[in-house]
Amino acid sequence: MHPDFTVLPTDLPATFVLADTAGAASWARTEEAIASVLTEQEQNYAKEFDAEAALTWAAGRVVLRHVLGSVLDVDPAEIEIRLDSAGKPRIDDGEFSVTRARRLVLIAVAEDPVGVDLEAVPDHAVAAEALTLLQPREREELESLAEADLPEAFVRVWARKEAFLKALSTGLARDPGMDYIGSGETPQSPHPDVDIHDLVEGVPAGYRAAIAFNR
């Protein structure tokens, strides 16, 4: 694994890699790094965004290719990443999921279909406004909390929910308010084949993360 990436400790059946594209892994934002591993199609796709968003997306894809290259023992530039019918990136030799939050990129590589999500803890106003996106029981649980506890509790639920939807390969095309996952200590999966877990160890302060496996 690249020395500028952090492999998170875990007992779960996946490899988790965290990279700071504005810190130790800032090299991933350079023109040289981008041109050396991204396909022409990927580089053109990045140009559809504004300058900063394009650089953030491209750096995340550089990190992803290096992580997959290390796990699969292949040249990062030679990995074929394709989009399925739902727009989810896939490879032929395994399953992975990638998430970005501000400057951080978190990648999970596993044998089973997997979804991972990393979220920065928002301020209270953002969390309160976003409650309408949750399932009614989840909303009730969070509305009962003290004001100071809401942002962290909300983002914990949201990370679980996004990970679950990614594992289903639907993403937010499926209404996030449909399924109850809960705000308690242990996530409750609404699907018999999907396991949801909070990621804690190695996740930086101010962020929350979750992973889901579709067995």
Image: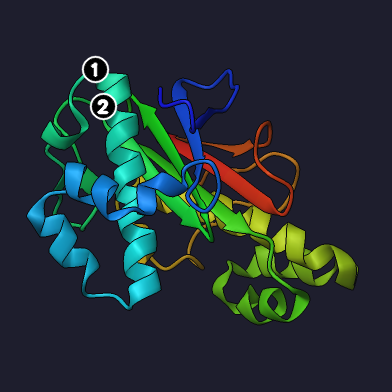
The answer to whether residue 79 is left or right of residue 61 is left
Of the pair 82 and 149, the residue shown nearer to us: 82
Determine whether label 2 and label 1 are within 8 Å by CB.
Answer: yes
Residue at 27%, 38% (x, y): give it: 65
Of the pair 31 and 6, the residue shown nearer to us: 31
Q: Is residue 10 visible?
A: yes
Q: Secondary structure at mark 2?
A: helix
Residue at 21%, 75% (x, y): give it: 48
Of the pair 119 and 213, the residue shown nearer to us: 119
The answer to whether residue 17 is left or right of residue 185 is left
x and y, in percent, of residue 189 in the image: 53, 43
x and y, in percent, of residue 169 in the image: 30, 49
Total labels drawn: 2
Are there few (<14), some (14-19), or many (20+) residues within 10 Å of tag 1?
A: few
The answer to whether residue 13 is left or right of residue 118 is left
Which dot marks residue 22? none
In the rendered image, which residue does mark 1 sit on?
Answer: 73
Q: Amino acid at mark 1?
A: Asp
The answer to whether 33 is drawn above or below residue 202 in the figure is below
Residue at 55%, 74% (x, y): give it: 133
In the rendered image, which residue does mark 2 sit on?
Answer: 69
The image quarter containing residue 124 is bottom right
* Image quadrant occupied by the C terminus: top left
* Image quadrant occupied by the N terminus: top left
Of the pair 187 and 150, the residue shown nearer to us: 150
